[in-house]
Amino acid sequence: MTTNSKTRRPLRGDGEYRKHRDKRQSRDYWKRERTAVKREIQKTREES
């Protein structure tokens, strides 16, 4: 199985990961994901 050297994560054949390997949108996608996760973490921190 081939691995993506950047993430060292095995590539899933038809999984959602493959969809986002399109270079034009992948960087934007991951940036969006990361900021969304950060926002969620902040929210949960404020609540507790």
Image: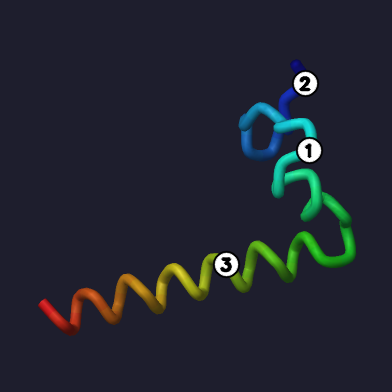
Image vertical order of residue 13 relative to residue 17, above or below:
above
Instruction: State left or right for residue 22 relative to residue 5.
Output: right
Mark 1 or 3, which is nearer the eye? Answer: 1
Secondary structure of the residue carrying tag 2 is loop
Q: Mark 1 is on which residue type?
A: Asp
Q: Where is 23 relative to 17, above or below? A: below
Q: Residue at x 82, y 66 (%)?
A: 25
Q: Secondary structure at mark 1?
A: loop
What's the amino acid at mark 3? Glu
Disc 3 element: helix
Residue 13, given in percent of the width and then of the height, sits at 78, 31
Q: Which residue is mark 2?
A: 2
Q: Which residue is mark 3?
A: 33
Q: Which mark is residue 31?
A: none
Tag shown at residue 14: 1
Select label 1 or label 2 by which is in front: 1
Determine the CA span between mark 3 and mark 2. Answer: 24 Å
Question: Are there few (<14), some (14-19), or many (20+) residues within 10 Å of tag 3?
Answer: few
Sequence-wise first label, 1 or 3: 1
Determine the CA span between mark 1 and mark 2: 14 Å
Residue 2 % position (x, y): 77, 21
Within the image, what quadrant is residue 8 found in? Answer: top right
Residue 19, image x and y in percent? 80, 52
Q: Quadrant of residue 40?
A: bottom left
Left or right: 46 in relation to 24: left
- The local crowd at label 2, few if under 14, some if 14 to 19, many if 20 or more residues have their Cα within 10 Å, is few
Residue type beneath disc 2:
Thr
Residue sitting nearer the eye, 13 or 11: 13
Residues at marks 1 and 3, CA–CA distance in whole angstroms = 20 Å
